[in-house]
Image (tube, rainbow, N blue to C red):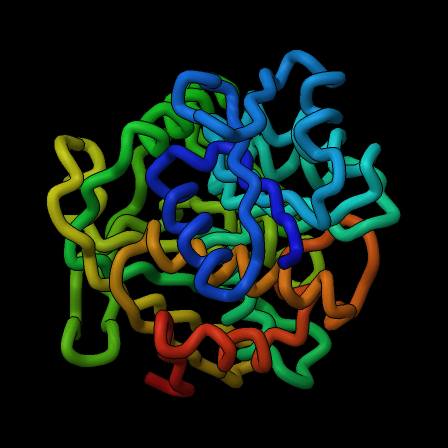
């Protein structure tokens, strides 16, 4: 079996990734920062490059599930580059994604290969189709609720600190940091959700991944207000949410729409990340080096491969 290192294997998303690797015939090698949680695994502190190098010895690829990614992404990705093996992470931290995109690598490096970031990028890329440019991309998240993990909360706190408490958006072809309130509006999701109040400019990793390779000057993401309020309230994660991701691409008065539906935003990050590794290791990539999902892979084909975890339809 092909060995794949999972860094942060004992975390919430990490456990899903380990299970998905086993299901698909890979040999997951468990790693992370906490040796006590890794009996028989390969513990490796992120501030110890030699330890990371030993952890990666003999593996075919690395999936990093350990947040905050501001702490782990660069050290683990750099170790993968030294080892000459592909690196994939599930980071939704905009600043960490930007850090990773600055790396130089001969092997594949794909940050944000998760529900937030990778999925939206694949959907937007598939919707663009043969268009070479667009005026705007909108990614609307309709969640039945959101009870974040401790890792999500910690990562969000680190991101807020890195941007000095400001929010960030992508408009006019560049990232902007703002200190005004999030705008609100109504978004008409496909049924059964229908019209829902959303926070506009609720920026996720999509505002980094999509404009990285698509010619579009405006990328806006939205989150249903009740889900965003659940995130603020936090608490124990006692149930999996259902989701609808509604992506609209507009260019010159024309519009294309694509919709993804599924359940559990953490669980579906596992097939996204593992499918990415499988495609990299079997040579099914479009570019080399550091790239987001939509640039690295054939987006429509990748989305089809995610069934039954995620179902995708055109036009709602």
Which image quadrant: the N terminus? bottom right
Camera-nearest residue between 307 and 41? 41
Camera-nearest residue between 206 and 197? 206
- The answer to whether residue 111 is above or below residue 1 is above
**Labels in figure, total:** 0
* Residue located at (66% from left, 75% from top): 298
Does 74 sit left or right of 234 as displayed?
A: right
- Residue 156 coordinates in the image, percent (x, y): 38, 29
Camera-nearest residue between 295 and 63? 63
- Residue 224 coordinates in the image, percent (x, y): 22, 54
- The answer to whether residue 95 is above or below residue 229 is above
Does 83 sit left or right of 130 as displayed?
A: right
- The answer to whether residue 259 is above or below residue 110 is below
* Residue located at (44% from left, 63% from top): 23
Which image quadrant: the C terminus? bottom left
* Residue located at (74% from left, 34% from top): 57
- Residue 206 coordinates in the image, percent (x, y): 51, 53
Whether residue 217 is visible? no
User: In the displayed image of the protein, which residue is found farthest to the right?
Assistant: 106
- Residue 142 coordinates in the image, percent (x, y): 25, 61
Quarter of the image holding residue 122? Answer: bottom right
* Residue located at (16% from left, 58% from top): 144
Whether residue 308 is visible? yes
């Amino acid at each position: 079996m092909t060995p794949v290192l999972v860094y942060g294997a004992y975390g919430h998303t990490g456990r899903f990734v380990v299970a998905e690797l086993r299901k698909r015939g890979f040999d997951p090698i468990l790693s992370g920062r906490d040796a006590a949680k890794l009996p028989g695994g390969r513990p490796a502190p992120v501030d110890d490059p030699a330890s990371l190098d030993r952890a990666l010895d003999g593996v075919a690829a690395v999936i990093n599930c350990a947040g905050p990614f501001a702490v782990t992404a660069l050290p683990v990705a750099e170790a993968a580059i030294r080892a000459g093996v592909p690196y994939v992470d599930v980071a939704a931290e905009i600043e960490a994604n930007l850090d990773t995109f600055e790396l130089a690598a001969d092997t594949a490096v794909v940050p944000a290969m998760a529900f937030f970031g990778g999925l939206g990028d694949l959907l937007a890329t598939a919707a663009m189709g043969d268009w070479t440019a667009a005026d705007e991309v909108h990614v609307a998240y309709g969640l039945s609720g959101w009870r974040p993990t401790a890792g999500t909360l910690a990562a969000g706190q680190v991101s807020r600190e890195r941007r000095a408490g400001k929010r960030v958006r992508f408009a006019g072809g560049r990232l902007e940091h703002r200190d005004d309130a999030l705008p609100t509006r109504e978004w008409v999701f496909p049924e059964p959700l229908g019209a829902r109040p959303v926070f506009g400019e609720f920026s996720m990793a999509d505002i980094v991944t999509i404009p990285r390779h698509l010619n579009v000057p405006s990328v806006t993401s939205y989150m249903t207000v009740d889900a965003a309020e659940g995130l603020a309230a936090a608490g124990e994660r006692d149930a999996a949410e259902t989701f609808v991701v509604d992506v609209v691409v507009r260019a010159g008065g024309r519009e294309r729409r694509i919709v993804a539906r599924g359940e559990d935003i953490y669980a579906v990050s596992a097939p996204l990340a593992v499918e990415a590794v499988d495609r990299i290791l079997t040579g099914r990539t479009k570019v080399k080096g550091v790239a987001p999902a939509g640039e690295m892979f054939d987006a429509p084909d990748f989305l089809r491969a995610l069934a039954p975890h995620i179902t995708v339809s055109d036009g709602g």
